[in-house]
Image (spheres, grey):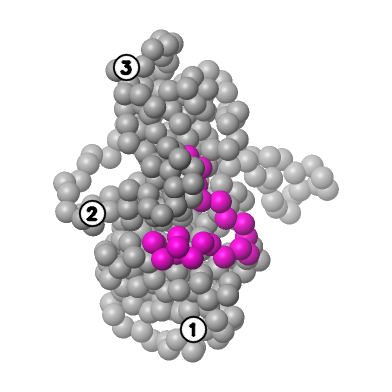
Amino acid sequence: MGYDDSDRRDGAAGSAPTAVKFLIAGGFGVGKTTMVAAISEVKPLRTEEYLTVASVGVDDVAGVGDKNTTTVAMDFGRITVSSELVVYLFGTPGQERFWFMWDDLVHGALGAVVIADTRRLASSFGSIDFFENRGIPFVVGVNSFDGRQDRTVPEIREALDLDPQVPVLMGDLRQRSVSRDVLLALVDHLESVHS
Amino acid sequence: MSMSHWADEPLDDDPEDSFVRPYTITHGRTVSTHLELTLITLVVALTPPEEQLGTRGLEPEHRFILEQCRTPVALAEIAARLNLPVAVAKILIGDLITLGTVAARPPVALAVGQRPDIRLLQAVRDGLRRL
């Protein structure tokens, strides 16, 4: 632990910061990196990982699926909260069926933001299903690049078949204040969902 | 602490050109023996790179890591700055842990379905509000 001054149980090591992460998910091109960029204190960083995945397809003979190594890339940013706490924001890679298997990316995430685009809400279904199944709390951020929305929150909620307690926020995620408010809603949600 | 934004700073050149076969650097190893390492494990040098003994035989990438983590930095960030995949960064950082030249600090442990510590959430909230 050690994210505030009153918590120094682990002696000298307590002076080192510790880190937490949030995931920024959603379909291809919905604005994941845009949100990371809006709120990160550093220019978004990009890193890659090799994932070994069983190939899936109709050609698979029973039990003889090949294993392929695939490379996925993600953009991420950082918010230094204090000398004891650093928050990382990881934009999930575009290829959903791969990052769903990236345990190191998913494991230990405090929560997630699923970004939705009203013109193609279906592209967010995969992320929503994934977080629901994994028990990872999430909020939905509806990106409106032009400040215009052709759908209401209740319509979006219904289209995405969301649990009533999942917060839905709308706004232009390029704006830092909007992206910040989405993350604040996630932190509030983390408190309420477990209480 | 002032909350700066990266767009206030000049942009770096994208180091696209430094392609090296990653597993040459690790001498063929593809998996780190340090399974505890994660993307947000914070890595910090235990002594300044210039004072470190017994670091002969290290690859330039090891030395780069030692330079990068004079102050604590997340493993993912080291991988990004090395322009190498996370798996390779884990192997190299694992080497330095074994040598005793860096220390690794694990992230806040969090089990699925368990509420994060309320003080942790409050600290995150305070940090976000300052943005």
Q: In the image, B9: left or right of B29? A: left
Bounds of the magenta span?
B105-124
Query: Can you tell which mark lies on residue A156?
Result: 1
User: Marks 1 and 2: same chain?
Assistant: no
Q: Bin the neighbour count of mark 2 within 10 Å (Cα to Cα): few under 14, some 14-19, many 20 and up.
A: few
Residue A3: where, in percent of width, then height?
Answer: 41, 53
Q: In the image, A89: left or right of A41? A: right
Q: Amino acid at mark 1?
A: Ile
Q: Residue at x 56, y 20 (%)?
A: B28
Look at mark 2 in the image and give the residue it sits on.
B1
Look at mark 3 in the image and give the residue it sits on.
B51
Compute the Cα span from label 2 to label 3: 30 Å
User: Marks 1 and 3: same chain?
Assistant: no
Tell us which disc is closer to us: 1 or 2.
2
Residue A143: where, in percent of width, then height?
Answer: 37, 73
Q: Residue at x 82, y 45 (%)?
A: A63
**Residue B49 image-quadrant placement:** top left
- Residue A48 makes an appearance in the image: no
